[in-house]
Amino acid sequence: MKEKISAIEQEITAEAITNGEQLEQFRIKYLGSKGLIKALFADLKEVPNEQKREVGQLLNGLRTKAQEKFDSQKEALENQDQEEHKLDVTRPGDAIEIGARHPLSLVRSEIIEIFNRIGFSVSEGPEIEDDWHNFSALNFPPEHPARDMQDTFFIEKGEKEMALRTHTSSVQVRVMENSQPPIRTISPGRVYRNEAISARAHCFFHQVEGLYIDKDVSFADLKQTLLYFAKEMFGEKAHIRLRPSYFPFTEPSAEVDVSCTICNGKGCNVCKYTGWLEILGCGMVDPNVLEASNIDSKEYTGFAFGMGVERIAQLKYRVNDLRLYSENDVRFLKQFTGGI
Ligand code: DAH
């Protein structure tokens, strides 16, 4: 028995363990429930009584030795494992793909910056709007065609009419209702119209509304403000022209063209050989509109304007199909840089 024990002891010392598989084999062979040491303990009952104590001690020693070897080898293997997977700080990093800003966001930010520089704040209003803010307070007569289902997406008809706003002029009304002149604000936002989607029309698009109300605001102020905008947006060479027009909420009203940014006014297929491109609508705020929002039209005058962001982006980036803005084609979107 003693010889067996010392033979196994030598065997244990000689065992080479270099991987998890060998470690497990070692455990089964020596420490397992059907292992060698367990078997020796079973044999202990055949050992003569006077030797039992000594042999028992030897067996305990053997078991401790096997257990210690198992523990130390296990730890060594775990350390080795960690060593192998250690972070290599000298490895070049994986490139992180950075997205690009949407062209409409770039243009909107630029418009905001241009007007911020001359003291316009930014205001916003809800996209789901009531009849009062979208139409009535803006002097739309009850039978005006814009109130027709064909142009407007109604959410609720009848007593309390709610619709997706058809223009950002609704925000003008909200600002006037909630503040007193002087008011100098622009309102960027999304608007909706019940139109078939094509290259030139979409059921949603973006506008920036402008409103300036104070004592003695004149049409000359409007013209000068828009000229400043056109030059900041399209370059020092840009000119503007105003054509008489009609909007229910302004009197007089005008549509504004900017000299074609592509041919510099000489005539090309973008400006249809006119040398001019329409960019916005504007006018002096109708006294009825001021009064509807409790602003004294004898004391105050003001101008307003509204421009389409897609239209400005089209001229700036020469995008000729409105659908591209909302199709999320990465090949289109990543062409526009401007920082994040
Ligand atoms: N709301 C007009 C539209 O959606 C644009 C507009 C025209 C806004 C004249 C104005 C304005 O503030 O004075 O087409």
Image (tube, helix red, strand yellow):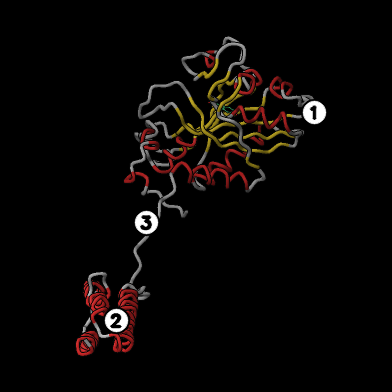
- Identified at 53% across, 16% down, the residue is 146
Which element is circle 3 on?
loop
Residue 299's label in the rendered image is 1
Which element is circle 2 on?
helix
Task: Name the residue beneath numbered marker 3.
Answer: 97
Q: 278 or 266, which lies in front?
A: 278
Between discs 1 and 3, the one toward the N terminus: 3
Which element is circle 1 on?
loop
* Label 2 CB sits under 8 Å from any ligand 1 atom: no
Q: Sort mark 3 into few (<14), some (14-19) or many (20+) by Cα contacts within 10 Å.
A: few
Query: Could you tell me residue 327's position as x and y percent?
Result: 36, 37
Residue 76 position (above or below residue 95): below
Of the residues tagged 1 and 2, which is closer to the observer? 2
Of the residues tagged 1 and 3, which is closer to the observer? 3
Residue 43 position (above or below residue 231): below
Question: Which residue is at the far front?
Answer: 49
Query: Could you tell me residue 142's position as x and y percent?
Result: 60, 11
Q: Is residue 272 left or right of residue 227?
A: left
Query: Could you tell me residue 300's position as x and y percent?
Result: 76, 29
How far apart, in angstroms, are the residues tagged by discs 1 and 3? 56 Å
Q: Is residue 234 left or right of residue 20?
A: right
Residue 150's label in the rendered image is none
Between discs 1 and 2, the one toward the N terminus: 2
Task: Name the residue beneath numbered marker 2.
Answer: 66
How far apart, in angstroms, are the residues tagged by discs 1 and 2? 101 Å
Pick the quarter of the image with the N terminus: bottom left
